[in-house]
Amino acid sequence: MASSHAPARRTVPRILIGLVAAGGLTLTTLPAATAAPDDPATSQEAAALVAAKAHDLEVVTEQFNEARERLRTSQDAAARAAEDVAAAEAALATARDRVRTVARSAWTGDRLTTLSAMLTSDSPDELLDRVGTLQTIADHNNGVLGGAQEATDEAGRARAAAVQAQAEAQALVDRVAAQKADLDAQVARFRAEYDRLAAAEAQAAREAAERHAAAEAARTAGQRASRDS
């Protein structure tokens, strides 16, 4: 009858393995969150910022994917833990039913009550034998219930640990996702700044070239006029 609580005991290590696989959730190293730098003054500064933030974004994206995988692992572990708790509780209910059945037989059977054993025993040895049988049944019932209850408690602790691991994994995903979104926005911002500054610098270069050409033309015209006079 000891097998009545064995299934619940076997399921617990499977949950613990899942938790180990999902462990270390709070130890993931993330790039330190920093305030966004000031607006670049030149297209060269903007390009450098785009390159730096794109590198940070690549690192965080990898960690975001890892965090999501850990979240899936912890969710699977939590689901298995819930299944194992249900199995352990079912085994405990079955054990209780069996104990009640045996107990009922002990009180109603011809040879299983202490009183009937005392009244019907033909010798002290027979009395001790019958009382010993009662004690053996009681010990067995206690063992069945105790083992089933222990398995249920163990499964409950595993489920609590799995739920905690899932919460930590979700918090990690949320934190990395927020950092990724911030870096996405910074990269887009500095790319836009680069485009604006590059266009402004190109326009300024064209205007400077035009002014230089006009000045050269005026100087050449002046020199020609001086020679003609």
Image (cartoon, rainbow, N blue to C red):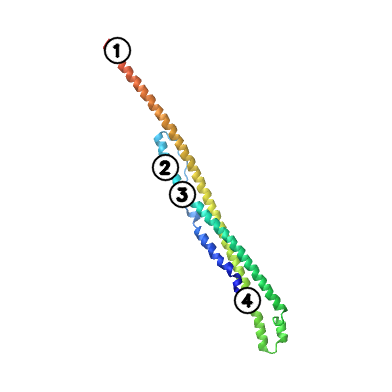
| C-alpha span from label 3 to label 2 | 16 Å
Check disc 1: other Cα within 10 Å, few if <14, some if 14-19, many if 20+.
few
| Residue denoted by label 3 | 62
Q: Secondary structure at mark 4?
A: helix
| Residue denoted by label 2 | 52
> Looking at the picture, how far across and down is residue 113, in whole percent?
70, 80
Farthest residue in the left direction?
227
Q: Earlier in the sequence, mark 3 or mark 2?
A: 2
The image quadrant where one finds the N terminus is: bottom right
Q: Earlier in the sequence, mark 1 or mark 3?
A: 3
> Looking at the picture, how far across and down is residue 6, in whole percent?
58, 70
Farthest residue in the top direction?
229
> Looking at the picture, how far across and down is residue 210, in whole percent?
37, 23
> Looking at the picture, how far across and down is residue 211, in whole percent?
36, 22
Check disc 3: other Cα within 10 Å, few if <14, some if 14-19, many if 20+.
few
| Residue denoted by label 4 | 140
| CB-based contact (under 8 Å), mark 1 and mark 3 | no
Check disc 4: other Cα within 10 Å, few if <14, some if 14-19, many if 20+.
some
Residue 18 in sight here = yes
Q: Secondary structure at mark 1?
A: helix
